[in-house]
Amino acid sequence: MTDTTAPEPIEKPTSYTDEVAPMPHWGDKGITMDALIKAHLVEGQRLFGWQHERMTAAFDYPPGDKSWPARLAMARMLNSTLGFLMSCVEASLLMDVQKHLAPEQADEFAEAHVGQGESGDYYPEMLWDWLVERGIDPELINAQVADEIAERPESDLDAERVAAFERVKALGWVDLNHIDEIVDAVLGIAR
């Protein structure tokens, strides 16, 4: 007979940042604005440390170095920089919102905000709606971006990226509902 008893959960060691300000996630009980602000402040400081470390690594390569290790180091630095900035902006905006809401309203806002941030389709769909509500045509923006990318000098792009972009462009505007077509096009897989 097979034992169907669930195994004991493995205790994951927690870090200082996990203990002092764990990032709230969709479905967590008791999400508060203070908890969300603290989590973004802590994440901003953590990513600032990583950004500094990765900047040091990226600057080990001479300017203009197009080697894979140099590009990877630069991409890692830029990723950490973006994460650091986004955490700081998020905390700053949430603190401003918190000043203008009653505590219970702020906590409701924080809970909704966490859910929206973890939903993969919320922001792409809302961005489209927000643009349309303000009289801006997202299709024209997409067409402009496609033209800008196509007009970049080939020296700025690997030949593979140009070919992959052309295959994606041939599909027309592709949204998250068509991610399989994007991946197939980039990989050169015919459906």
Image (spheres, grey):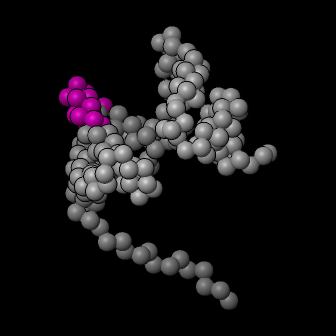
Q: Position of residue 82 (x, y in %)?
A: 34, 42
**In this orientation, does residue 36 appear?**
no
Q: Which quadrant, please, contains the C terminus?
A: top right
Q: Which quadrant, please, contains the N terminus?
A: bottom right
Image point 55% across, 27% down: which residue?
A: 151
Please name the predominant secondary structure of the magenta segment in the image: helix
Is residue 110 within the magenta segment?
no
Is residue 92 within the magenta segment?
yes
Above-or-below relation of 130 to 51: above
Instruction: Name the foreground residue: 62 vs 14.
Output: 62
Image quadrant where residue 106 sits = top left
Image point 66% across, 35% down: which residue?
A: 166
| Magenta segment boundaries in residue numbering | 89-105
Image quadrant where residue 72 sits = bottom left
User: Relative to 34, is 82 on the left or the right?
Assistant: right
Image point 71% across, 33% down: which residue?
A: 171
